[in-house]
Image (cartoon, helix red, strand yellow):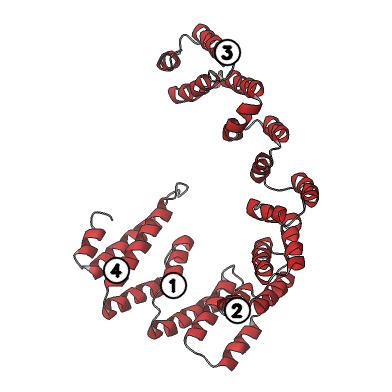
């Protein structure tokens, strides 16, 4: 792709570049492959970038050809679900001319007809409303459409975005409050509504509603957002904050946020206890810098324990090298050099037949 398509675009062979890009997309879509490493995602992203480059240079005839290809692929469902989503988002974000808007409405009508019970149904309904507005449909027709689909969150989002663009904060707040009632069983939507309300109540200076929404998000919605937790701290007296902090730390917030909060609050004994009980190496390493200063003996013991527990599990050069990194790490602790030498000497005695391990010990200076 990089060798041929980029060169074709540079030389203005735009139709050919577009066709080759789509050929690659078709081929990779039909491969029976495991995409756990994100290969298809990466190729689809490259295709999207090339489409944008081609569109910037394309004349009307070429753009028409591009639109027809996207439109036909979507109508005939000739792509897998992920690629279809990529193409859908591309066609909706681009092709803003009126002749394409009408065709996009027809495409959306087909999707709405087919996918009445699908996850994307609300998205299609909302997109159709935005296009109707761009095409200056009569206000009465638009209002009837809004009323018909008002229970769908995407319709309310379109209206909310309009009020935000107009800086009509009160109307935007009303939409969000109603949305919280209509979508109370949807955690993701509720989190979004709460965050928007926090911002808006702060903007309009409604301190009581701001505090209510902020605490509701943190405690009732399990809002693991450290920035909002610290907004709450700024809005509290020191006594109030201590009470809130105790409640936050006792709750079911994400462990990662909890550890970060303990560090920021200087609650090092509690931070140590959390990390020690879990004994996850990545957490030990992440907080080593701060805990090493306060609890050097404890941290040394923790790393020595990790090394001894894993010395029988390692079996190849890469694993030996990783474990020996921790052997070197403990030499930086008081008393750690002695511990490291004793462990290395024991390995030379017990694992002397493991040549790769002995080699890695030599490289590390043991």
Q: Earlier in the sequence, mark 4 or mark 2?
A: 4
Query: Residue at left 62%, top 84%?
Result: 146
| Residue highlighted by disc 1 | 93
Q: Within 10 Å of the Cα at label 2, are there few (<14), some (14-19), or many (20+) other Cα atoms?
A: some
Relative height, residue 132 to residue 315 (above, below): below
Q: Position of residue 326 (x, y in %)?
A: 53, 23
| Residue highlighted by disc 4 | 54
Q: Position of residue 305 (x, y in %)?
A: 63, 20
| Residue highlighted by disc 2 | 163
Drawn side of residue 262 relative to residue 239, left or right = left
Q: Are marks 3 and 1 in contact (CB under 8 Å)?
A: no
Q: Within 10 Å of the Cα at label 4, are there few (<14), some (14-19), or many (20+) other Cα atoms?
A: many
Cα separation between marks 4 and 3: 63 Å
Drawn side of residue 309 relative to residue 100, left or right = right
Q: Earlier in the sequence, mark 2 or mark 3?
A: 2
Q: Position of residue 163 (x, y in %)?
A: 60, 79
* Element assignment for label 3: helix
Cα separation between marks 1 and 4: 15 Å
Query: Residue at left 40%, top 71%?
Result: 73
Cα separation between marks 2 and 1: 21 Å
| Residue highlighted by disc 3 | 339
Q: Within 10 Å of the Cα at label 1, are there few (<14), some (14-19), or many (20+) other Cα atoms?
A: few
Q: Earlier in the sequence, mark 1 or mark 4?
A: 4
| Any part of residue 281 in sight | no
Query: Residue at left 47%, top 65%?
Result: 85
Cα separation between marks 4 and 2: 35 Å
Drawn side of residue 201 relative to residue 317, left or right = right
Q: Earlier in the sequence, mark 3 or mark 1?
A: 1
| Nearer to us in this view, 238 or 54 | 238
């Amino acid at each position: 792709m990089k060798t041929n398509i980029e060169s074709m675009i540079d030389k203005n062979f735009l139709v050919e570049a577009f066709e080759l890009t789509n050929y690659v997309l078709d081929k990779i879509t039909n491969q029976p492959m495991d995409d756990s490493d994100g290969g298809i995602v990466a190729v689809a992203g490259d295709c999207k970038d090339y489409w944008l480059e081609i569109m910037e240079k394309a004349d009307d005839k070429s753009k028409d050809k591009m639109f027809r290809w996207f439109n036909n692929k979507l109508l005939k469902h000739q792509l897998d679900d992920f690629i279809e989503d990529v193409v859908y988002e591309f066609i909706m974000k681009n092709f803003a001319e009126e002749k394409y808007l009408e065709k996009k409405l027809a495409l959306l009508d087909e999707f709405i007809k087919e996918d009445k019970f699908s996850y994307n149904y609300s998205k299609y309904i909302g997109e159709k409303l935005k296009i109707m507005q761009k095409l200056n449909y009569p206000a009465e027709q638009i209002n009837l459409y809004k009323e018909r689909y008002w229970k769908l969150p995407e319709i309310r989002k379109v209206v909310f975005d309009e009020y935000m663009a107009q800086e009509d904060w009160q109307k935007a707040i009303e939409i969000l409050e109603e949305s919280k009632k209509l979508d109370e069983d949807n955690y993701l939507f509720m989190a979004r509504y709460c965050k928007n309300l926090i911002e808006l109540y702060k903007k309009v200076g409604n301190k009581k509603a701001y505090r209510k929404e902020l605490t509701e998000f943190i405690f009732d919605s399990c809002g693991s957002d450290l920035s909002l937790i610290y907004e709450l701290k700024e809005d509290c007296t020191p006594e109030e904050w201590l009470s809130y902090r105790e409640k936050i730390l006792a709750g079911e917030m994400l462990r990662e946020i909890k550890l970060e909060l303990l560090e920021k609050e200087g609650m090092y004994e509690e931070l140590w206890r959390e990390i020690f009980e879990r004994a996850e190496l990545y957490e030990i390493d992440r907080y080593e810098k701060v805990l090493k200063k306060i609890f050097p003996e404890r941290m040394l013991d923790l790393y020595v324990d990790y090394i001894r527990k894993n010395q029988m599990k390692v079996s190849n050069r890469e694993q030996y090298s990783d474990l020996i990194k921790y052997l070197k790490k403990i030499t930086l602790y008081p008393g750690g050099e002695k511990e490291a030498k004793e462990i290395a000497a024991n390995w030379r005695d017990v694992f002397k037949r493991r040549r790769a391990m002995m080699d890695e010990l030599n490289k590390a200076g043991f």
